[in-house]
Amino acid sequence: MAQPTLHTDRLLLVPLADRHLELEVQLDSDPEVLRFIAGRAHSRDEVVVSHEQRMALTEKVDGLGYWMAFGTEGGSRGSTAPASEEKGEFVALMMLPPAHGPDQPDDPMVAELGYRLPRRCWRRGLASEASRALLRHAFDTVGQSRVIAQTMTVNTGSRGVMEAVGLRYARTYFPVWDDPLPGSELGEVEYEMTREMWETGRGDR
């Protein structure tokens, strides 16, 4: 089962491919987009490495990986999904790889939900809409046992998305930072959705 193309009311989610590299470069060129991830913009060389790592992770668990989301009218409320990526506008990098970080379980049945949007697309509900589609894919298609999401404690925007799509707070932890960001002293938070939560209706379908 390869990564499928996914659809929502406003979005077309296409599996990440090499042709999308320049969109990733543009996304990571804004330091505000990476404020809670790196605290600065990434260079093109850094994005190339990240892209290669993402493509490698798509090979680990069939069906998991990364998607590029496209919308029309900037994904504004009331807009509709484009018929193809060529007819749409890039609005988000959506992430659902197998858990792989140093503070994550080494378990192929656990996936990590993530999202990264251009600043012009913030506060339109796009991350929540796309995340619901990825949760449905994780549990109903891939058969994951758990999906986690992690962010800095001070990242209230990202935490709001996690709560909006039905994930519950699981823990606060304190990773070792090579170059601590402002707010890192408050640690990071992990939210989760378990299969039981999904099947009993806590996931927002």
Image: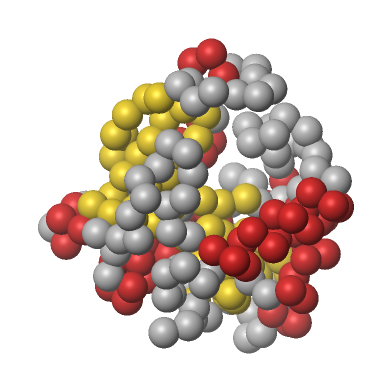
Asked where in the image residue 77 lies, by quadrant, the reply is: bottom right
- Residue 37: image location, x then y, percent: 64, 36
- Residue 75: image location, x then y, percent: 64, 63
Does residue 94 appear left or right of residue 106 in this picture?
right
Of the pair 19 and 104, the residue shown nearer to us: 104
The color scheme shown is secondary structure
- Is 106 rendered above or below residue 13? above
Residue found at x 53% / y 13%:
185
The answer to whether residue 29 is visible is no
- Locate the N terminus by quadrant: bottom left
Of the pair 79 and 144, the residue shown nearer to us: 144
- Residue 132: image location, x then y, percent: 40, 61
Of the pair 17 and 84, the residue shown nearer to us: 17
Does residue 170 appear left or right of residue 101 in this picture?
left
- Residue 122: image location, x then y, percent: 64, 46
Residue found at x 47% / y 50%:
100
- Is 56 rendered above or below residue 189? below
Residue ranking furthest to the top: 185
Asked where in the image residue 134 lies, by quadrant, the reply is: bottom left
Tally of numbered tags: 0
- Locate the C terminus by quadrant: bottom left
Residue found at x 58% / y 17%:
183
Residue found at x 42% / y 52%:
99
